[in-house]
Image (cartoon, grey):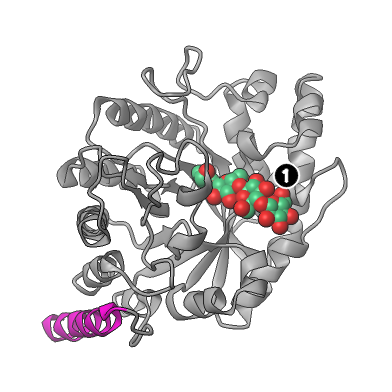
Amino acid sequence: MLLGTSLAAAAAGRAGAQALQPGAAAAGPGLYQIAREKGLTFGAAVQAGLLASDASYAAAYEREAGLLVPEFEGKWATLQPREGEFDFAQLDAIVQWGLARGRATRGHALVWHESFPQWAVAAVAEGAPRARAVMAAHIARVLSTTRLRIRDWDVVNEAVADPPGSDTPQPEGELRNTPLLRALGPSYIETAFRMAREQDATLRLVLNDYGLEEDTPWAEEKRRRLLVLVRGLVQRKVPLDAVGIQAHLQIVRPFSRPVFRDFVRALRAEGLAVLVTELDIREGNGIPEDYVARDRLVAERAAAFTEAALEGGVRTFLTWGLVDRYSWLVSEPGVARQDGKLHRGLPLDWEFSRKEMWRAMAQAFAAA
Ligand code: G3I
């Protein structure tokens, strides 16, 4: 094992060192190969349009991503924009691209309030029977269409309400106030999972959420709320297989390795797998000007987080994109930096070159 570790670490170090020469083309094994050598999976969120239009983008995914997740192509708003009208073209483009290269695609997300088209909002507001029928029809059609190609789905995304003090205040209650919660009550969550399980006995069904990672009272309360939800689902024998931790990290927030490691262990103790599903790292506006200082801080947080997750038992890591240039961190209002600088929160920089963050993750995988 030691020899294996030192060889893998050397590969990560060499690949990292070679690849980190300014402007160097990425030499050496990609993150997914370094991870795979240790029985881990590394992948990234991907956009079908960019795979088709940007050869450097496609080459980067070919080199680095062993698992794909559609950034928006698998969501309700894209798959069923109008009732009964399904469009799988963009999702299928991602699945086919992956299959041609021996890469799997995971599904994101069957039920998510932020990608819930207006027609569905209006329909579920008509009452519980209609709401149940609309949710059942979507889940049945999506899973029956993709079941031979996508074996792992975020069934419900972001079901837990943000604790007080967040910038999006939520009415009282520990579950997010969404159209389906209003129509069906808290049982919508287990209903979604049972409907998914009815479609296929072997799909991995995942509950995905954010804000669970950092060492703050806010995140501690969100972790508590998620554990209450998860323990209830497990007790009621709801077909839940895994929890997805999004991990949109912020450097300006403290991070504690033992706190996060123990949270992962608490979820694993419920018999669940735990995945890191959307890792990226936001710098905040006060972070130093030059790239070197910022990339170092991002890499340090990436190392601490990845190592803590590995210690807790996480075996699958996805970043939310691979390349800074196309990250939601640089385009999303309220997330992008206000000082004109652009976040550098992903493994590859604007020009697709491997950054300190890439090496930090490569070394954490190699040392696993
Ligand atoms: O460019 C596409 C166009 O080709 C396509 O036809 C059209 C279809 O709606 O969408 C166009 O662009 C937008 C897409 O981002 C690409 O930038 C979509 O309009 C827009 O809705 C989409 O936003 C995504 C957002 O979720 C909502 O789905 C972001 O890419 C994506 O980064 C973001 O990801 C979420 C996770 O799903 C859940 N966790 C938080 C994370 C960040 O908000």
Pointer 1 residue Cβ closer than 8 Å to ligand 1: yes
Image quarter of the N terminus: bottom left
Q: In this image, 288 relative to 174: left or right?
A: left
Residue at image point 50% right, 74% down: 61
Region rendered in magenta = 1-22
What type is the residue that disc 1 sits on? Ala
Residue 282 seen by the camera = yes
Q: To which residue does mark 1 refer? A: 77
Q: Which part of the image, by quadrant, shows the C terminus?
A: bottom left
The residue under the point 32% across, 41% down is 284
Q: Residues within 10 Å of mark 1 (few under 14, many from 20)?
A: many
* Circle 1: element type: helix
In the picture, measured across the screen, residue 54 lies left or right of residue 236, that is right
Q: In the rendered structure, does residue 336 fall within the stretch colored magenta?
A: no
Against 134, residue 22 (above or below) is below
Write the residue at 29% across / 46% down. Answer: 264
x, y percentage for residue 188?
A: 63, 29
Q: Which residue is the extreme one toward the right?
A: 84
